[in-house]
Image (tube, helix red, strand yellow):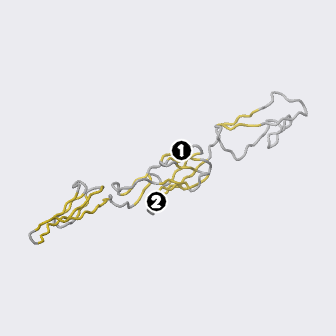
Amino acid sequence: YFWDVTDEDIAFISSTGLLTALREGDVITRVEALVTSGSRKFKIYSDCMVKIHGPAIEKILLNQNKINITRGEGIQLTHTIIPTEASYKNVIWESQDETIAIVSEDGYVLGVSTGETTIKVSIPDTELFATCNVTVEPILATNIRILNAPSKLYINDTCTLSYELIPELSETREVIWNSSDDNILSITNDGVC
């Protein structure tokens, strides 16, 4: 018998037919035999296509397992496959709750609203995955500005004040209105004076 492969950079085959994978790729293995029938000699052979894969994936890791971001802020997560030479085509990123945080197909996480969720990266056709807990915190106001304040009021006049938080996307649970002198001007919790 005589054994051969089409690409010895991908696989090596011994004289006994032991195939050793060297790297990923496709090879055709062939076994040939010289057959004698009477005075006639002829070759017979058989080919076999072999697809060689890299090492099996053992696990997937994330560069962070817990992050805190504010609404509107983003952060890049990255994954690592173990072993690093394992072959895989892609990963799937998903958010447990897209109303709190979304994730792009390359692992960029963006805070949408205040709350907690989990980002998961998985390898298709396997049960392997990694997660990162995400806390999206509110944007806190650093200043407040009164809008539409009249420059003067007459006795028994009323007005309704409004406000703007700075930065604009800030969240607040409660605004407390008050006057420096309630005997001159009183104001309700709704901004009515």
Q: Residue at x 81, y 30 (%)?
A: 150
The picture quadrant where one finds residue 180 is: top right
Q: Residues within 10 Å of mark 2 (few under 14, many from 20)?
A: some
Q: Residue at x 23, y 65 (%)?
A: 46
* SS category of the residue bearing label 1: strand
Q: Is residue 26 left or right of residue 32?
A: right
CB under 8 Å between discs 1 and 2: no
Where does label 1 land, which residue?
Answer: 74
Residue farthest along the right direction in this orientation? 156
User: Residue 54 location, x and y as percent?
Assistant: 32, 58
Q: Tag 2, which secondary structure?
A: strand
- In depth, the one of 155 and 92 nearer the eye is 92
Residue displayed at 54% across by 53% down: 134
> Which residue is most to the front?
39
* Residue at the spot of label 2: 129
- Under mark 1, the amino acid is Gly
Determine whether 27 is above or below 189 in the image: below
Image quadrant where residue 38 sits: bottom left
- Report the front residue among 179 and 92: 92
- Identify the mark nearer the N-term, 1 or 2: 1
Residue 151: image location, x then y, percent: 80, 27
Residue type (three-letter) at the residue carrying disc 2: Phe
Give residue 35's position: percent from left, percent from top. Answer: 14, 69
